[in-house]
Amino acid sequence: LKYLPLDLASRWAQPGFLQAMAAELETYAFNADISQLMSLIINAFYSNKEIFLRELISNASDAMDKIQYQATSSPEKLATNPDLRIRVEANREAGFVSVEDAGIGMTRDELISNLGTIAKSGTKAFMEAISVGADMSMIGQFGVGFYSSYLVAEKVIVVSKSNEDEQHIWESTAGGTFVVSKDETFEYGKLKRGTKVICHLKADQTEFVESDRLHDLILKHSAFVGFPIECYMERRKEEEKSGSEEKVVTVTRHWELVNKHKPVWMRQPSEVTHQEYADLYKWFANDWEDHLGVKHVIQTGNVDFKALLFCPRTAPKDMFDMGKMAERFSIRLYVRRVFIKEFNDLIPKWMGFIKGIVDSDDMPLNIGREKLQQNAILKHIKTSLQKNVFQLFNDLAKD
């Protein structure tokens, strides 16, 4: 009893306590389609396992969108935890990565249905897409991104607190069943409202306990998520001990805001300052100079998309080497502000010095990376980008 929390230890001796605990801690079987999906993910020979973090962050963002929507008619629902941010933390000693949000949270019944007993419509569609060659990285587009956690985790724990219920825990090692219980110990913290996903990493996935690695992944995939994303950074400093050959390692930790850049392409060009364009360009193009010119594209019609096309101030040294220009990955594709792929053929190779961002909500669900080039929507975007690059050149010539 001395190892139990005091409030739990005091209740241990009460009549019926063990029966009540057993009733609250129940094991459930996964829906057959979900069980098949998890088996597919666990056994997949897929090297790009890093996408799990992108998917968990996207889910966290969606959950906070939902509580914001509820708050438009019921402000008191947001008041239980108005600090809308996402926090990503690695625990080196315990071997896990966690993603916490202040979103809508889930009740006990929602944990059971949303994460196990009721398959989303995209579950079967995703498995069918995979069977015909779609890429695992598209899992989030089918609404089942949560299960990508099992690309890196041997056990996943979900702690959630809804305004409509007490805090509960969902846990599974993906063996066909999951357990849901009321959170009595608050081992992973007491949430005001929201969800915390804890991924206990497989033995060969320890790269994800490195805070620098997580920081880089957030920048790569989730830099333009609409809520602040903080990463718990770890800094290790070695110092020699005076009078000894031993070295003393000092470890410091602090929360750091990662997604400092905003998706300015979502705004009207008249609302964006030169400095905002310049800051974004220098970050994603890795250039120390401001851009020479920018074309802000907002296209509606058969295909809706937004884009930023930047012309650098200094021409690349290999500008006239078409072989090298053809290898330049110059255009980044985002779907709903989430990074999908970088392209070297969305514009002619002689335009390879142009740097750009394209964001579209119209990309279909069942498309893998290797099939993007044949996609009709992308072909439409490709034609439009080329026209807009020429318009950018004309604008620069007038100036």
Image: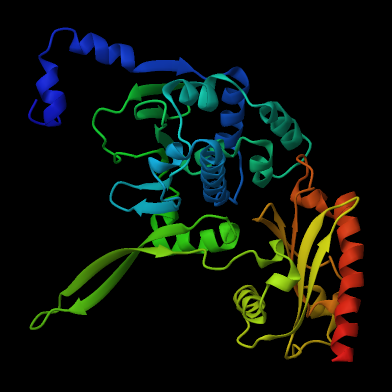
Q: Is residue 330 visible?
A: no
Tell me: residue 243, above or below residue 145. Answer: below
Q: Residue at x 34, y 39 (%)?
A: 191
| Left or right of residue 307, residue 106 in this image | left
Tell me: residue 119, above or below residue 332. Answer: above
> Where, quadrant-wise, is the N terminus in this rendering?
top left
In the foreground, 324 or 233: 233
Tell me: residue 89, above or below residue 236. Answer: above
Based on the displayed image, in which of its 4 quarters is residue 101 positioned?
top left
Q: Residue at x 37, y 16 (%)?
A: 26
Q: Residue at x 90, y 57 (%)?
A: 379
Q: Residue at x 40, y 29 (%)?
A: 171
| Left or right of residue 181, residue 370 in this image | right
Image coordinates of residue 253 in percent, x first then y, are 29, 63
> Where, quadrant-wise, is the C terminus in this rendering?
bottom right
Based on the displayed image, in which of its 4 quarters is residue 234 positioned?
bottom left
